[in-house]
Image: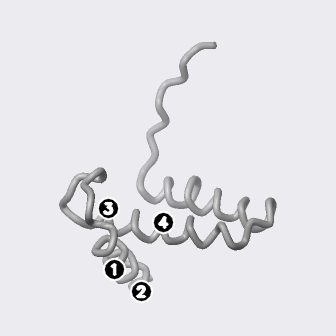
């Protein structure tokens, strides 16, 4: 099997296509309503990670990143 080149997405496209698209399939197609809450929490933390100055893999930042993500969502 031939290796596929990596797909380049903007942050907005990633959120729409991957995060929200997968969440929609999880809730509406697979009926995994309770598991969707975990995906929502990870998505909120991801939004916060996009805003802070730390590397994505830095440990111990979840609480602060979640707070930043919630603040960012409130602006929408």
Q: Is residue 23 left or right of residue 59?
A: right
First reached walking from the N terminus: tag 3 or tag 1: 3
In the rendered view, would you say 66 is above or below 12?
Answer: below
Work out whether residue 57 or residue 25 is closer to the camera in this orientation and state it. Answer: 57
Give the number of the disc on residue 50: 3
Q: Is residue 45 left or right of residue 22?
A: left
First reached walking from the N terminus: tag 3 or tag 2: 3
Picture coordinates of residue 14 (x, y %)? 49, 53
Mark nearer the viewer, 2 or 1: 1
| Quadrant of residue 72 within the rendered picture | bottom left
Work out whether residue 69 or residue 39 is closer to the camera in this orientation and state it. Answer: 39
Q: CA distance from mark 1 to mark 4?
A: 12 Å
In the rendered view, would you say 37 is above or below 74?
Answer: above
Picture coordinates of residue 56 (x, y %)? 30, 53
How many neighbours does mark 2 have within 10 angstroms: few (below 14), some (14-19), or many (20 or more)? few
Picture coordinates of residue 25 (x, y %)? 73, 59
First reached walking from the N terminus: tag 2 or tag 1: 1
Work out whether residue 15 or residue 25 is closer to the camera in this orientation and state it. Answer: 25
Secondary structure beneath dot 2 equals helix
Give the number of the disc on residue 43: 4
User: Which image quarter holds the N terminus?
Assistant: top right
Evaluate if marks 4 and 2 touch, with contact meaning CB atoms under 8 Å apart.
no
| Quadrant of residue 47 within the rendered picture | bottom left
Secondary structure beneath dot 4 equals helix
Secondary structure beneath dot 1 equals helix
- Image point 33% across, 79% down: which residue? 67
Q: CA distance from mark 3 to mark 2?
A: 16 Å
First reached walking from the N terminus: tag 1 or tag 4: 4
Give the number of the disc on residue 67: 1
First reached walking from the N terminus: tag 3 or tag 4: 4
First reached walking from the N terminus: tag 4 or tag 2: 4
């Amino acid at each position: 099997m031939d290796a596929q080149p990596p797909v380049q997405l903007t942050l907005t496209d990633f959120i729409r296509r991957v995060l929200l698209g997968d969440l929609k399939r999880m809730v509406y197609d697979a009926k995994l309503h309770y598991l969707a809450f975990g995906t929502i929490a990870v998505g909120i933390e991801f939004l916060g990670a996009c805003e802070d100055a730390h590397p994505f893999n830095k440990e111990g930042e979840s609480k602060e990143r979640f707070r930043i993500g919630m603040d960012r969502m409130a602006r929408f």
